[in-house]
Image: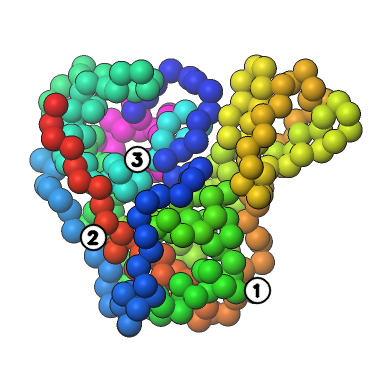
Amino acid sequence: MQRTPATPVTSLGTSTGGTTQGIPAAGSLQDNTTNLAQVEPKSHPVGDATAGSRTFSTNCSGCHGSDGRGGERAHNIATARQVMAMSDNDLVGTVRNGITGSGMPSFAYLGNKGIDDVVAYLRTLQGKVAVVQVNGDAKAGRDLFYGKADCGRCHIVKGEGGFMAPDLTDFGAGMAAETIELAITKPDARLQPNQAVVSVLLTDGTTVQGTARSEDNFTITLQEQDGRFRTFNKQRVASILHMGHSIMPKDYETRLSRKELDDLVSYLVAVSADAPAKPARGRR
């Protein structure tokens, strides 16, 4: 929820390393993903989601983004599996009490009803009861992900792949197929600041490009395409140019056929529905 400005941090949707979960065999995905992929809610919010949307817009969107998928100052709380796995009581407690040392303040002043409303609205953002229609072959999509499309060079899914770009294990949770396809074919349409390419010109004439993982008044840390992190003292930096685009290829719309795009989308939907959730913590 809303908090004081801080140095940009890596969002929950950005991977900076692997996980311990192994990827399932390709055959474990549904053979025919023309079925409906559905994520069942773990509990039933008692609040009013419509009222919660207004409260969220006023108190939370400034940091977490209007869609809850994260911003410069706070994490993704809409599709991050760690948050989706939390019980309603846990979410209520987090909103009411805040998180010490994280910049997340207490919102106890909203009262019980206001907090319940926010949690109910968050559940709608998470797509907990959304039914997603997909038309492709998830197994073929997995082959594309780690093959022709080469998504796995930068993205990780269930511990397998690269770590330069966001973890896509739960990316497709509750999202419409058209929205996922747009993220593939128009990757810069909803570009987050921590996903944009930054070009740093050093005083010795060397140029280094990568994704900015942190920056303050004295240093900037880039993650290069090979995954390495490099931190530069700004006394050695002549200029910093924010390129306004991601490292993701821009030609998937022409590189992949209509069927291949459907297959890739189906894989992302299927793997997000299949991903094991972390157990919800007990209420404090």
Q: What is the x, y in percent for residue 115?
A: 19, 29
Which sits earlier in the primary sequence, circle 1 or circle 3?
3
User: Is 283 drawn above or below residue 30 in the view shown?
Assistant: above
35 or 62, which is in the foreground? 35
Magenta segment, which residues?
Answer: 52-69
Q: What is the x, y in percent for residue 277?
A: 26, 52
Secondary structure at badge 3 equals loop
Q: How far, Cα to Cα, is label 2 from label 3?
A: 16 Å
Give the residue drawn at x 19%, y 42%: 280
Image color mode:
rainbow
Q: What is the x, y in percent for residue 57?
A: 35, 33
User: Which secondary structure class fits the magenta region best?
Assistant: helix
Q: Identify residue type, mark 2.
A: Val
Q: Is residue 197 left or right of residue 62?
A: right
Which sits earlier in the primary sequence, circle 2 or circle 1?
2
User: Is 97 drawn above or below residue 130 in the view shown?
Assistant: above
Q: Residues within 10 Å of mark 1 (few under 14, many from 20)?
A: few
Magenta span contains residue 59: yes
Give the residue drawn at x 66%, y 61%: 250
Which sits earlier in the primary sequence, circle 2 or circle 3?
2
Q: How far, Cα to Cα, is label 1 from label 3?
A: 33 Å
Q: Which residue is mark 2?
A: 39
Residue 254's disc number: 1
Q: Which residue is mark 3?
A: 77
Q: Identify residue type, mark 3.
A: Ile
Give the residue drawn at x 17%, y 53%: 41
